[in-house]
Amino acid sequence: MINLNIGKTLLMKRAEKGITQGELAAFIGVSKASVSKWEKGHSYPDITFLPQLASFFSISMDELMGYEPQMSEADIQKSVPELIARFKALPFDEAMAHCREVIKKYYACVPLLFQMGLAFLNYGQANKGVSPHFADFLNEAKSLFVQVKEVSDNAILRQHAINMEACCELYLGKAENAVILLEEECSQPSSFSMKANLAQAYFMLGNEKEAKGTLQSSIAGHLITLLFEMAFYMTYCADDKNRLDEVSRRALALINLFQFDKSNPSTVMHFYMRAAIGYVKADAEKALDMLDAYGETAKNLIFPITIRGDDFFDLIEEHRCNHEGKLSVDLLKLPLDEQSIRRQNVQTVTTSPYLTPLHDHPRYREIVNKLHKILLNEEATK
């Protein structure tokens, strides 16, 4: 149920205009007592009076009713973790009902819908072995991504929504649906030159710093995408030891060249995990080396998770700050609390069925124990 704040709005706007309840009542054609009841919240104006009231105060109907269909980016970043935290303190149905109430109120705010979808997806993944509601979280997330896809007029946000919808389908075991979603999207020509053209435009306007920041952001984004794709490629080359070694060599050279283990440890950890999965059958020791590197990189995690500046990406954080408030999609800024992300990073190693062949190896237990100490500050259960 949406709470209407007509009374507060009328009281505030009447004070701003410097008129009495009687003067407002005379204009609308009702009694002073009626206006008094409206302002106290004891009753609402008849629907036929709403256009007159909005016109009288020169405000929109939404503003008159105190309804805010949009939420600022700062409010989204604050509200989403608070909503998700309710799943720890309340029964699932009660927490989900509260989330749905907020979503319903701001159903026109597609950035909120997208971030809530991400939150449901990530929280479901992080608690896959703990909560029995894994599929519920995924289906809830999928419905929000579908809504964003259908109503958003932002091409980038829509593209991300399609990709996340496909992720939900994959986690739900419906790969055929993911193929249908992604084949057409992946066939579209990419606009590789857009950031370069934007940077050139900034440069021509004399804003060299903004031009450099734009390109740094773009370069970092392409590097993240490249490492993600190389990570998945590792898992698909499990039957080719030579190819595994070559992909690993090139990816590690890229990580070292750009010092991504420090500026973007989350992406590097993802690579090491996928590399470990790729090596499990071909070379168990190499797989364990990758898991060990996963743990070492975890020491560099800084929250909230996002790419950090360094000597090369010296403008990227300033560029990000300068563009706060504009519609953006930063998939690195996970809408989860720090402890959930830490637990998820441990569970990635301990619950992955692909790593089961390593469970009896002494090094595997050492690595898991180290991860518990690094990420959860506790000893692993024996």
Image (cartoon, rainbow, N blue to C red):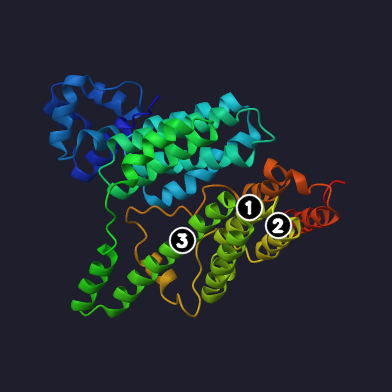
Q: In front: 203, or 258?
A: 258
Disc 1 is placed on an element classified as helix
Marker count (numbered) = 3
Q: Nearer the viewer, mark 2 or mark 3?
A: 2
Q: In front: 11, or 128?
A: 128
Q: Which mark is residue 226?
A: 3
* Picture coordinates of residue 132, whole percent (x, y): 65, 28
Q: Residue at x 78, y 59 (%)?
A: 370
| 240 relative to 347, above or below | below
Q: Which mark is residue 278?
A: 1
Amino acid type of the residue tagged 1 in the rendering? Gly
Q: Which mark is residue 287?
A: 2
Task: State which tag comes first along the sequence, 2 or 3.
Answer: 3
Residue 83 as seen in the image, left or right of residue 371: left
Q: Nearer the viewer, mark 3 or mark 1?
A: 1
| 95 relative to 273, above or below | above
